[in-house]
Structure formats: structure tokens, C-alpha cells
Amino acid sequence: MGLSGKEYFVRDLVINDEYGVVKSTATVQDAAKKMKELGVPDLVVVEEGTDKVLGVIADFDIVQNVVAEGTDCSNAKVISTMYKIDPVKLDTPVSEAFTRMQNLRVNVVPVVEDGKLVGVCTIQDCWSYIPDVIPDERGLIPVSNTKVAEFWFASISAVTAFILGILLPLVGVFGFFIADQADVMTLLGLADVRGGLLNFFLFEAHGLDFFVPILSLIEQGGVIWAVVVAISTLLVIFGVIGLLTLIYSSYADTKNIRTGRVVRILLPSMVVLLLVLEWIFFAIGFALASIPVVAGVDPIGLTMSIIAMVLFIVAINRDYIFKEKGLVESKEAEVK
């Protein structure tokens, strides 16, 4: 909880004036060695020759932008890996410094005076000196604690979306398309032509007395069915990853832990993209079949896929669902 009443400034914080710096011409390997030597997770990057503050390089940036990309740490420069953040001054309000770090989801901001680095302050330093909790003005539904509400909303939405869009089609509760069983058996070159319908799920198709793995359609139906199987496999993999990243990133928000755009947006968004591709390539597979196959959309499956995609999208954009309850009440008071 923040302090109330008095507005505090950066000069009121305990500024770490011995914080490590690294020159802009240094390599990422040099920065990592210095972090290890000083026992710190971040270094301020200053311009070679002028000592102008350019940004901050964090161990997280090195892992995500260099190591994960397979880049040679001995050649990569810190200036290409650091994050850029406008320094604060001693007379900057603590709430402004906190907001600056929160918006970028970083832990450190440099403090300068007369253009020279005097130290750094961290988001943890600022937390206890904020006069009031910074109101969350975005969103539609007023709640007392937006971060906790967003965590539960994102978690429940992600779990529900995973069940409806991936798990149930995987186990065969409902599928994507419904085709004439006789047409499919003819496509497979089977003389035993039976009536009825086949429901196409993620990896297989089921009828009343007939079962066929989608892989079996590749030889007669074409390579497009291999693409369908590949998309189905990726959908299951990214479905699990998207579920976990949504829960993790929303929980991290409650603890003011920084998470990148890959975790917050890209990975969960892949689930939506793959669901769309699944429907498209199923349709293409039937359209390009060497022997005409009468197929139609499974209405329940389509409805559940749409619901799952919407739930993933709103979970990703959870910041726009809830807003600070106290802010709404104060605005209503002003109107009265």
C-alpha cells in the first residue's frame, strides 16, 4: 500500500549512487560479466565519451534478446539489447517514476541531475512512497483491485477457452466438419461403402461404425491433410503454452513482475491464429479432394471455437475489462 497525503519525490528515496554502469560500446558478454562481478541484475548504459545516459540493460534482456535468439554474446553490443527509458530527476514525483517503469514493465530507471547520472531507483523503491495507489482508468467494470480481478478473469477465460477450443475437439466431444461417410470411404479406396456421417475432430474422424485417423487421408486426399495434422499438433502445443502464459503473465501483474510482449501477447495469440487456420485448412482439404466429399460445418464445433477465440482475445486484453472502483466513485462525486 502507498502512503497517503504528502507527495514524495525521487530525492526522498534512497538512491543507489554506486550502481553499475557500462559503456555503449561494450558487448553483452562484458555487461554480463560486470553484473556477475557487482551482483546486480541491471546496468545503466552510458554513451562512450560523454557519459550521457542511453538506457538500461537487464539480465532479462540478455536472456530474451540475445541468448534465446542464439546471438553471439561476445559480438552483440549492449546498445542493441538495452531498453530505453527516459531518466528521472531528483525533483520527479515518485508516482511518475513508478508509472514510467510500470508502463515499460521494467524494474530500474536512471536518476540524473544536470545531465549526469547520480544513481538509479527501482520500482520496489517507489512502491511505498506512492501517495495513493495509481488508479487504473482503462476498462469497463469497476472493481476494487484491478490486478487481482484481471488475474482471475484471465485464468478462468484461458482455461475455459482451452477446454472448449482444444480439449473437447481432441477427445471427440464435438469437431470441425461433418462429412458423408460413404464419400470418405470412397476417397480412401474402400469398397465397403456405408452410409452415415463422419465427425472430423483434431486428429481423427468418427462415425457410428467407422473410425479413420486424419493421417490416413494424406495418401488419397493430398498433402493438405498433412498440413491439417501439423496445425492440429501445433494447436495442442500452443494451446497449453498460451494457457500457461496467460495465467503466468496475469499473476505477474499482481506482483509487479515484468513480462515481455512475447509472453503477454504473442504466444496466446498463436492459439487464436491456429484455430482459424484449422478451420480454413479443413475446408481446403475437402474442396481439393480428388473424389468429391460432401461436408458441412459442425455448428456446435464452430460455436465453441468462436467462443474459445473470443475468450483468448479478451484474456489477452484484460487490461481493458476492469478499472479502478475508487476512480469511478470519485468521478460520480464530482458530478454530484
Image (cartoon, rainbow, N blue to C red):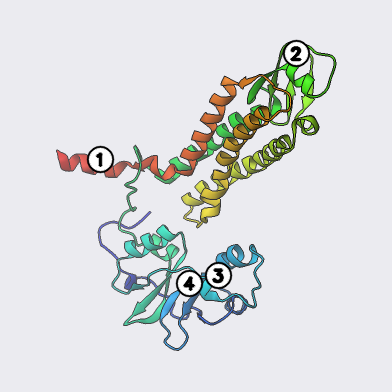
How far apart, in angstroms, are the residues tagged by discs 3 and 1? 40 Å
Q: Amino acid at mark 2?
A: Leu
Type of amino acid at the residue the image marks with label 1: Glu
Element type at marker 4? strand
Left or right: 282, with 336 as reference point: right
Answer with mark 4 or mark 2, whichever residue precedes in sequence. Answer: 4
Quarter of the image with the C terminus in it = top left
Image coordinates of residue 75 in percent, x first then y, are 63, 77
C-alpha gap between disc 1 and disc 2: 59 Å
Q: Amino acid at mark 4?
A: Val
Q: Is residue 141 left or right of residue 225?
A: left
Residue located 45% across and 42% down the image: 150
Any mark on residue 41, and which?
3
Residue drawn at the location 79% of the way across and 17% of the way down = 210
For the residues labelled 1 and 4, the Cα–Cα distance comes to 39 Å
Quarter of the image where one finds residue 143: top left
In the depicted structure, whether residue 271 falls above or below residue 181: below
Could you classify mark 4 by the number of other residues whose Cα lies within 10 Å: few (under 14), some (14-19), or many (20 or more)? many
Tell me where residue 109 appears, x and y as whole percent. 42, 69
- Determine which residue is flagged by label 2: 208
Query: Which label was assigned to residue 329?
Result: 1
Look at label 3 and name its amino acid: Pro
Determine whether 117 is above or below 85 in the image: below
- Callout 2: SS: loop
Of the pair 288 and 196, the residue shown nearer to us:
288
Residue 129 relative to residue 298: left or right: left
For marks 3 and 1, the one nearer the N-term is 3
Disc 3: CA contacts within 10 A as few (<14), some (14-19) or many (>=20): some
